[in-house]
Structures are given as structure tokens and as C-alpha cells.
Image (spheres, coloured by chain):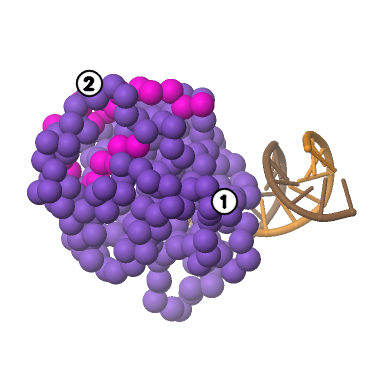
Chain colours: A purple, B brown, C orange
Amino acid sequence: MSQIVNNNLFEEQNHEIPTQMGFIPFQTNLTFPSLKAFNSIASSLTSDSDSTISNLTQTLLTTNPQKSRQYLSPNFGETQFLSLHRSSVNPWAILGGGTSDCFKSGKRSGLILDDHHLGISPMKMKKMKGRKKVREPRFCFKTLSIDVDVLDDGYKWRKYGQKVVKNTQHPRSYYRCTEENCGVKKRVERLAEDPRMVITTYEGRHVHTPSNHNNLYDSPSQFDNFF
DNA sequence: CGCTTTTGACCTGCGC
DNA sequence: GCGCAGGTCAAAAGCG
């Protein structure tokens, strides 16, 4: 079980709501996060524009400034925080000219800041030789979870690798969606600076419904109120 | 028995 | 060109 811990990381590093990051609160009795929202994001992150997350955040700020402030408060006790961000270093994401990064002000380490290496496998590189590189949409969630690394997002994943990343104590795990013809991958690792934080990076879009669709896909969550 | 996880080897890109 | 680091493969082991 995940424990409820306040998210102080953003408070320490960024006192403003980043323009390209969405803050998604969800109750701990819900699985991570609403699948409806998950798919909504995944399907919207397909263009070269970097505006999607920015727009979502702006929408939240515009429509519900009180709540958006609340989510940034370190005293928002009963809600576990979840952040959504897209790396500005990622060549796929950088096309929109984005510059905001939730770890920008922090030390360079871990998955986010090495992002120029992510999402493009050697095999893919090989296959793409001589062709224009086409990147799958990627986005990552940062969650606070003391003892659970892999959050239940409704899809079935098979682990295909684990790697100890330099300067980190915790290994990075690589997962692939088990559904046939679905090439979605995800990486899971804990943040070096704060092992309570789990970084989950998704790459690609599911071409099918979640395996536990009935239980989760339609379940309401606070997340849905914003997207 | 079939599926999943583990883990060492291998491949590729990048920086020096 | 070489070494390093990240990402993936695939055989073996584990598990229900």
C-alpha cells in the first residue's frame, strides 16, 4: 500500500505552477490514476506541440484556482499527489520549444534529466537508421509511494529488464504491455534525491482497453474533474 | 505447463 | 577510437 505523504519536492524546487506540468491529485483508495484520464492524456500527447499539458494546467488554474493552489500546498494531507510532466530535453517534447522541467532546478540525476536517452531504444535506432526519427509520445508521472513501485494503471505489463542507473541506489525497471500489437512501454524507478518518489514514464499509446477495464476505466476520480 | 521475472550479455549512441 | 551508460534480448529460474 502506498502511504500518504505530502509532496514537498515541488515546494522546495518550484514555488510556481510550472507551465508544462499538470498536478493531478488522486485519493489513495483509487488506483493510479483514473484510466479514463490516463488514456485521455495518452491520446492527446500526439502532436508536436508542447501545449497539451500546458493547456491542461492552465485550464485547471482558470477553472479552479482555489483547488490548483490547494494541490500545491504541503498541508493537503489526505490526498496523494501525482505530477505529470513532459521533459523539455526529450527531442520529441522539445519540438514545441518547452523549457520548463520539474527537476530543472535540481541536481542532474535520474530518469528525467537523462531523458535525451530515453524513449529511443538501440534497436529502434537501428531500425530507424536512414529514416526520420519518429518518437512515441511519452509522459511521466511522479508519485509518492513508500513501498509500492509499480502502480496499478489497469494494464498488464511484463518486465523485460532491470538496470542500475549511475548515481542511483535504486534500479530502473523496464516493462512492456503484454497485449499483442501494443508496443507501449513504461519505466519505473525511484528518485535518487527522494526514494519515496516513484517516477513512472510511459512511452507510446495503448491500442486496446485496459485488462481490468470494468473495474477501473469508468471509475470516477478527482482527476476526471479537470480533464 | 505456461507465464513472469531475473540477470548477464550484447548493442548502440554519445562524449571525450 | 575508446570507454561508458542506457536499453533490450534471451536463457534460465521461479511460481502458481
Amino acid at pointer 2: Asn
Which secondary structure dominates the residues rendered in magenta?
loop
Q: Is residue A24 above or below residue A41?
A: above
Q: Quadrant of residue A48?
A: bottom left
Q: CA distance from mark 1 to mark 2?
A: 33 Å
Q: Position of residue A171 (x, y in %)?
A: 53, 35
Viewer can see residue A83? no
Q: Position of residue C9 (x, y in %)?
A: 67, 59
Q: Is residue A23 above or below residue A4?
A: below
Amino acid at pointer 1: Asn
The numbered disc on residue A75 is: 2
Q: Position of residue A97 (x, y in %)?
A: 18, 60
- Part of the protein shown in magenta: A1-26
Viewer can see residue A209? yes
Is residue A105 a member of the stretch shown in magenta?
A: no
Residue to which mark 1 is pinned = A212
Mark 1 and mark 2 lie on one chain; the one further toward the N terminus is 2
Of marks 1 and 2, the one in the foreground: 1
Q: Is residue A16 above or below residue A124?
A: above
Q: Residue at x 35, y 43 (%)?
A: A221
Please give the chain letter of the residue carrying mark 1. A
